[in-house]
Amino acid sequence: MKQFNAFKTLLFVILLGSASSAVQAQNYHPLAFGTMGGAYLNPNWYLDYVGLNVLCTAPASVAGSYVYTTPGGTATGSWGGVVTTPLINDTLKLAPYPGDTCGCSSFPLGYFTNRIAVIWRGPEGAGACDFSVKASYAQAAGAIAVIIINEYAGEGPVGMGAGTSAAGVTIPVFMIGNIPGIALDAALDAGDTVTFTISPWGTGLTNNLGFVPGGTAAWGNFAVPWNQLTSPSPAPYLGLDGAFVANFGTNTVSDVRLTTSLSFNGSVIRTGASDTLASFPTTDSIWAMFEPNPYDVTASGPGRFDLTYNIIGADIPSVSKTISFYASDSVYSKGTYDFTNNVPLSTLATGPVSSSGAAEDFVWGNMYYVRHGGAAISSAQFSLNNGFLGALSGTLSSVDVLVFRWIDGSNGLPKDSIVQNGELDCITLANYNFQPADTSGTIIKTFPLGQLNGFGDTIDGTYTGGVFLDDTSFYYVAVNVGGGMSIYCDGQTDPYPRIFGHFYNGGASYMDNSNILVTGDYTAATAGNPGVLGTDAPNQGYSPTAFPGNFFIDAVDSFNYGELRQGLIPSIPLITTATPPPALAVKNVAKASNVLNIFPIPTSDNLTVSLNLSQMSNTVTYTILDGLARFVSKQTHNNVTKEQFDIPTSNLAAGTYFLIVDANGRAMSRKFIVVR
């Protein structure tokens, strides 16, 4: 069985499904949150279905819901206390400085009395102590809860093993990411009073409506180049505003609606509202509230869109939340992008490991839609995590970045808005060799994707000019990761509310190419077997796969919301340029084609590979991906200049495959077909 680490999550899904039917409703009770019957029977109902709300309530500079992990995992089991009675506006206190800020030694007696202790993970390198040791020392000093900040630069929260002292820890323990943790630490260092509310449901207030954490619908991308945003908007660029709204209070609230205001560069460009919900009871306490129709998103130049949501009801104060997205100069990004430092936000790493802990190779990325072509691919960005090993160089020497073009309905397949085996073509790729300075969390620009030719033949330096994007086309930008590494995600973006809203507001005509991660064990995908969810997975009706050959979106409301993890959008933006570098002198194309040859095509039992390099490569890797860009197999040969050998294909299902070859720091690909 295969799992995704950190959150016991596994399985990325790029949703490209269409629906056979849809329910036209602006206010809809989402089945994904379960039903409560006639009374509030389970004090952990919110925890079970949504997750604890770990909310900073003051000061405003660091306020908001925090992405977190709690102790435990498949190997160690859960430990620490469970929040059943809310911690309401409790004050945080830092571990003493100067002193042991990582909590690996005891604190003064009573130091944390009636406070939430804030402790750093680590220290990095030698001297780090168990998470449970930190928590036990804080508990002994009077703490009512512990927040551990991940001190590894740029990293998000990770799983916390039991260690040696878990049995005695009875207070709740949470970990938050490095970037929000630094801001929290700075506020405390500045003398601010920082308060948190950690609640499995409400805080005991009479009238208390709010947003489910991660429950506001964002636009389909965090950023696309502004010249893509012309009217009328194609389906991937349509906006649809809405949110999952919860009644956290003890009273039914009447006449509730959700209003929206969209601004561009500070000027309001549209407003809207959901239908009014006449009665919002506490026993049916989460509703999806959406506007009735999608709308065009357009821009006349670069800038920022600010989408503000307001919950309005009788006898309650308005509750607001603002989210932003961008019309960029050249960046396509699904996840949050930092335009100040020109890097994607990368705070939460995840990747597959087997149930035995063995490393798994995998391919993961984002699908981008290009409405207006003409620009050239310049580069892709990504960030990898190598766990506690730190350095990425050495035996974990390289990684491939691949760009596939998807043409729906190509190769005689039906045009059905679903990526099928045979519809992808690898149009360019690059191999990045890690340098001694590259460490986990390093943002790496892959150079130079834009200088590869359409077949990726760069082993001998062949160059035929830039790779240009076409009109009305989809591009899958992915990283082929091996050696037990994982890919960083933005740590906060959740596409599910938008997917839900589009489905229930005309989903039969809408396609959403977003990544959704769901928990549950998963049988590894093999050729011809897309993988099967295990017995502990939700009853979702379909088995999602990397590029689903199924109508997963039909089951959009049959997932338990707690099984959908926000923040797990891979931090892999695509950077383009309108002025690619001039073409270098083009080497003989015939020579380039002789560098790598494969035959016969199509094949049945064996694929013969012939490699002819101009200089010896210490290591050559041969990776096979299936027609949906999923990892199938890999083999490594050493000290190669010329070789010819057979790769058995008798165990592969009929269909399209890609052979990816890395040698001398370069990469190329060849497509082949297996017939039965």
Image (cartoon, grey):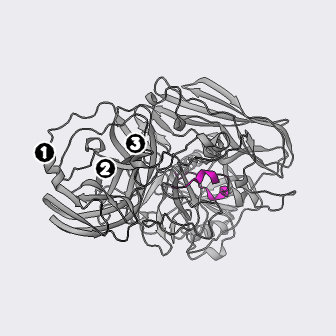
Tell me the quadrant of the picture where the C terminus can be found: bottom left
Amino acid beneath label 3: Leu
Q: Is residue 524 left or right of residue 294?
A: left
Q: Label 1: which residue?
A: 588
Q: Which residues are magenta?
A: 549-568
Q: Nearer the viewer, mark 2 or mark 3?
A: 2
The circle drawn on residue 429 is 2
Give the class, few, some or many, for how many residues have Cα within 10 Å of label 3's Cα (few <14, many ≥20).
Answer: many
Q: Secondary structure at mark 3?
A: strand
- Asked whether the beta carbons under mark 3 and mark 1 sit within 8 Å of each other, the answer is no
Q: Secondary structure at mark 1?
A: loop
Out of 554 and 616, give the one closest to the viewer: 554
Residue 310 percent location from the top left of the image: 71, 35
Sequence-first disc among 2 and 3 = 2
Sequence-first disc among 3 and 1 = 3
Q: Is residue 120 left or right of residue 384?
A: right
Quadrant in the rendering for residue 80: bottom right
Amino acid beneath label 2: Leu
Residue 343 percent location from the top left of the image: 42, 43
The circle drawn on residue 574 is 3
Q: Is residue 136 left or right of residue 340?
A: right
Amino acid beneath label 1: Asn
Q: Nearer the viewer, mark 2 or mark 1?
A: 1
- Mark 2 vs mark 1, CA separation in Å: 20 Å
- Mark 2 vs mark 3, CA separation in Å: 13 Å
